[in-house]
Image: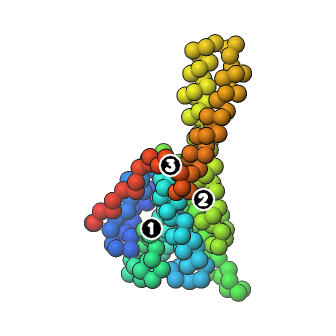
Amino acid sequence: MALQLNDFAPDIRLPDQNGRIVDLASYKGLRVLVYFYPKDDTPGCTTEACGLRDHFPSFNGSGLAVLGISPDSVASHKKFVDKFGLTFPLLSDEKKDVVQRYGVWGLKKFLGKEYMGVSRTSFLIDPNGRIVKIYSKVKPEVHAAEVLADIKAFFVIEACQEFFVQQVFGQVLAQGAAGVEDIIRGGAFSFRGRIDQLEGSFLGKGPEPVQRRTAPAERAE
């Protein structure tokens, strides 16, 4: 059965380019982009990986971890990472257990020939481990910017929730229903300011750093 939005992401436990085991469960509390790609050091996969690398400072500042997965070997991943200076782990799924669990391994066709391979697909996972977006038929040249826009949207949603729950609702309880309109009108300026702060921090140019968990340290096994 294909994975759906709001499903819990299947567990991932694979070696990275250094042979260290990476466990998806250890990223709980962070947003994680798990992206599946067909093969190291091929044109489309290189474009996708380098785009994610170039956007990584913004991803990292927002608390987003990035994990790439393909059936390539650990040694192949190591060469790919070193050649292009990639700044996130690439996980080796040579047994194809994870690609099958995520439903991205299947029949493909190229120049009239059919073969089994990985469909270029990404999954955005929330801090609770649920899938909040599935990117199918990823376009390598725009994928990083697409993810960045979605993360920014999540920041706005969080800011809305924080503002209305902590500020507006609290003031309504304190002052009564008669003052609701004035509270919301006056609070709109504070809300806009909070959005600007979050956006500035997110893009690495604001005065207020975003307090997020960092990605867990990898461990040898």
Label 1 vs label 2, nearer the camera: 2
Residue for point 65% across, 73% down: 141
Give the secondary structure at mark 2: helix
Local crowd size for mark 1, using a 10 Å CA cut-off: few (<14), some (14–19), many (≥20): some
Q: Residue furthest left?
A: 221
Kindly report the distance in space between the C-alpha atoms of the residues bearing marks 3 and 1. 26 Å
Residue 25 in view (yes/no): no
Kindly report the distance in space between the C-alpha atoms of the residues bearing marks 1 and 2. 16 Å
Please indicate whether residue 221 sits to the left or right of residue 206 in the image. Answer: left
Identify the amino acid type marked 2.
Leu
Kindly report the distance in space between the C-alpha atoms of the residues bearing marks 3 and 2. 20 Å
Q: Which residue is mark 2?
A: 148
Along the line of sight, the residue nearer the viewer: 107 or 15? 15
Residue 221 in view (yes/no): yes
Where does the image place residue 147, in percent across and percent down from the top left? Answer: 61, 60
Q: Quadrant of residue 52?
A: bottom right
Where does the image place residue 11, in percent across and percent down from the top left? Answer: 44, 56
Along the line of sight, the residue nearer the viewer: 79 or 94? 79
Residue for point 38% across, 74% down: 17
Q: Which residue is mark 1?
A: 88
Identify the amino acid type marked 3.
Pro
Give the secondary structure at mark 3: loop
